[in-house]
Image (cartoon, grey):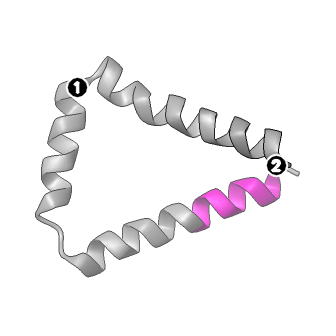
Amino acid sequence: MKDSLLTALGLVLIIEGLLPLLMPQAWRDTFQRLIVLKDGQLRFIGLISVLGGFLLTMFSR
């Protein structure tokens, strides 16, 4: 289980690092758009992300 968790964390870091590595201006623009969102909107984005990750995890088994 520990190995799987570390592998998953490593993959998240790789995927998260691709956008600033390959397209830093688009990454910066995205964060500037996120800053102006209200807390409820950011929470909704987080909820959708968590649900999407959960569904992907469940369907990949």
Query: From the viewer's perspective, is residue 4 above or below residue 33?
Result: above
Which residue has dot 2 on it?
60
- Residue drawn 22% across and 25% down? 24
Residue furthest out toward the bottom = 40
Q: Is residue 22 magenta?
A: no
Q: Is residue 31 left or right of residue 22?
A: left
Q: Quadrant of residue 11?
A: top right
Indicate which disc residue 24 carries. Answer: 1
- Residue drawn 11% across and 64% down? 36
The location of residue 10, given as percent across then percent down, is 61, 33
Front residue (pair 49, 1): 1
Number of numbered discs present? 2
Q: Is residue 58 magenta?
A: yes
Residue furthest out toward the front = 2
- Residue drawn 28% across and 74% down? 41
> SS of the residue at dot 2?
loop
Query: From the viewer's perspective, is residue 1 above or below residue 54?
Result: above
Indicate which disc residue 49 carries. Answer: none
- Residue drawn 62% across and 57% down? 53
Front residue (pair 7, 35): 7
Query: From the viewer's perspective, is residue 34 above or below residue 42?
Result: above
Q: Is residue 20 left or right of residue 58?
A: left
Could you give the CA–CA distance between mark 2 and mark 1, rounded to whole angstroms?
A: 31 Å
Q: Which residues are magenta?
A: 51-59
Front residue (pair 9, 54): 9
The location of residue 57, given as percent across then percent down, is 75, 55
Q: Main secondary structure of the magenta part?
A: helix
Tell me which label, 2 or 1, sits earlier in the chain: 1
Query: Mark 1 is on which residue type?
Result: Pro
Dots 2, 1 in contact, CB < 8 A: no
